[in-house]
Image (cartoon, rainbow, N blue to C red):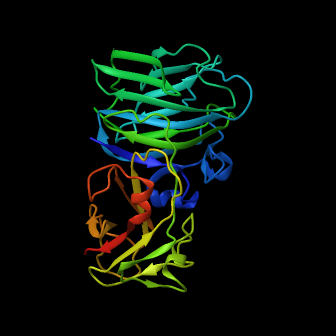
Amino acid sequence: MALILIDGFDHYTNAQAYDKEIEYSNGSIGSVASRFGIGQGLVNSDANYLTTLNIGVNKSTIYFGIACKKVTGGSPSLTISWPWIRFRDESDVDQIQFCLNSLYGIAVYDGADALLGSTADYVVPDQRWFYLEGKITISATVGEVTLRVNETQVLNLTSQDTKNGSDYIRKISLSGIQSSIVAYYDDLYIDDAQFHGDCRIRAFTPDSISGTNNSFMASAGNKDECVDESISNDDTDYIYSDTLNHKQGFGITTGVLGTVKAIQLNNHVRIDEAGTRKIKPLIRSNGADYQGTETDEITAEYLFESEIFETDPDDAAAWTQTKLEAAEFGLEITT
């Protein structure tokens, strides 16, 4: 039981959203929606603009957190025709839907548009960032929806029928709050066991080359300069290898950090010849190499291959600034 997904929307463009297997990207990703003025966030300007993230696994219970901001002034008009956030099963059937009412309370509906319950009024600030968290359990008899705003519980629904499709949640869809009311999103997590509180997700890029795992080639210049862009530039510059068991690692500089809940290692990869290739994410910590889970076959189109590591694999203890800046991160060709 662990973190399933984290995303700060910092390391990719609208076009590259599909490289992360985001299914519908009708919103836009940009710096205007960054919660802390660094990096990027997600902008959805209309209820018909859906950004659907596939969490990659079916779960009957999820915990989630996401920073939200109602950007456009004026009171929303509550209507289930314009769900604000939706939780869907693997067949795109809505299970649970959130709407914002005219008095800035959150109304919770099931997938058949029946109201399950509402928060008190004015739990959501107008045109201010807030951190929304929730626990959702899918069941025909013991379903649950618990909501927290800025770490304060605002709703607790139990013994509900939350099942409209299968027994699971597989996807989360984010939109504008309704027609012409813009919403910003940032700093998303999905977990299957616990709340994490108000979280910030930061992106770090390589700034040094491993002295041990250094087998790849650079398309031009230094290897770390080929992969140091905060947003991948695809084939402008890159590192490459066609040799089984080749490894490449890089160092990062984080600066001062608060409590580190987890890290996510992202490799943006593709093949440029026929054949089969797979990789494993690679962490070198305290002088030893640790591999993550082998990917599916790499394709001719770029994909982000990502894995979450909640602890340092060397000692199974929490990550810290010191550990992260001493470690190296990269990949190994395994097939």
Q: Using the image as rendered, state which of residue 122 and residue 206 is in the foreground.
A: 206
Residue 50 visible: no
Instruction: Tell me: residue 123, above or below residue 70.
Output: above
- Residue 119 in the image, given as x and y percentages of width and height: 52, 16
Residue 59 visible: yes
Q: Using the image as rendered, state which of residue 136 and residue 169 is in the foreground.
A: 136
- Residue 244 in the image, given as x and y percentages of width and height: 27, 81
> Residue at the spot x=51%, y=31% of the render?
132
User: On the image, which quarter does residue 323 sit in?
Assistant: bottom left
Locate the C terminus and report the quarter of the image it occupies: bottom left
Q: Name the side, left or right, on which 36 lies relative to 66.
A: right
Instruction: Tell me: residue 195, above or below residue 100.
Output: below
User: On the image, which quarter does residue 135 sit in?
Assistant: top left
- Residue 28 in the image, given as x and y percentages of width and height: 62, 50
Locate the N terminus and report the quarter of the image it occupies: top left
Number of numbered discs overlaid on the protein picture? 0
- Residue 22 in the image, given as x and y percentages of width and height: 47, 52
> Residue at the spot x=43%, y=29% of the render?
134
Most distant residue in the right direction: 73
